[in-house]
Image (cartoon, rainbow, N blue to C red):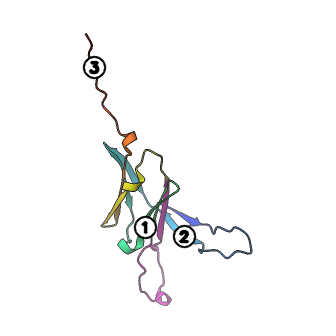
Amino acid sequence: MTEKTVPVKRESSDVQTTREEMRYLLPAVDIYEIDDALVVVCDVPGVDQSGISVNVDNNILTIEGKTLDREEDISKEVHREYRLVSYHRQFELTEVIDQEKISAELKHGVLTINLPKAEKAKPKKINIKVKG
């Protein structure tokens, strides 16, 4: 996974920002095609159902996962090599996907998103008429 920083989007210097700059990971994904859909399998360890968000806006599929905050006394921490951070990943969708029928399931830190193909994108068998 690659760690990135979400930049603060600023329209002008006089406008307050709506979010703080934050660190996040690009979760590893596998994307495969089945007969009537594309399937995205995304690893988001440390995220539960209340911390995951899958949205589509302007043909952009956005996956966001907020990791569980651990109650710890950080003042006693001497060394840490690993820290859970949030996840963020986006994909551009085309008209091939029926956005109204997208579904998602989270199980044991693995998010599976089903992206059904639109009827016009599904293969069609053409009947051949025999004359004579």
Give the CA distance from mark 1 to mark 3. Answer: 50 Å
Q: Earlier in the sequence, mark 2 or mark 1?
A: 2
Q: Magenta segment, which residues?
A: 65-91
Disc 1 designates what residue? 53
Q: Residue furthest right?
A: 13
Mark 2 residue type: Arg
The residue depicted at 30 percent of the width and 31 percent of the height is 125
Disc 2 designates what residue? 23
Q: Earlier in the sequence, mark 3 or mark 2?
A: 2
Residue 61 sits above or below residue 33 on the image = below
Mark 3 residue type: Lys
The residue depicted at 70 percent of the width and 67 percent of the height is 11
Q: Secondary structure at mark 1?
A: strand
Q: Residue 77: x and y, percent?
A: 47, 85
Where, by quadrant of the figure, is residue 12 drawn? Answer: bottom right
Image side of residue 59 versus residue 108, left or right: right
The residue depicted at 47 percent of the width and 77 percent of the height is 80
Mark 2: give few (<14), some (14-19) or many (20+) Cα within 10 Å: some
Mark 1 residue type: Ser
Q: Are marks 1 and 3 in contact (CB under 8 Å)?
A: no
Q: Is 1 inside the magenta-drawn segment?
A: no
Q: Nearer the viewer, mark 2 or mark 1?
A: 1
Residue 108 sits above or below residue 35 on the image = below
Which disc is residue 129 wearing? 3
Q: Residue furthest front?
A: 132
Residue 131 sits above or below residue 90 on the image = above
Q: Residue 107: x and y, percent?
A: 30, 65
Q: Nearer the viewer, mark 3 or mark 2?
A: 3
Q: Residue 37: x and y, percent?
A: 34, 47
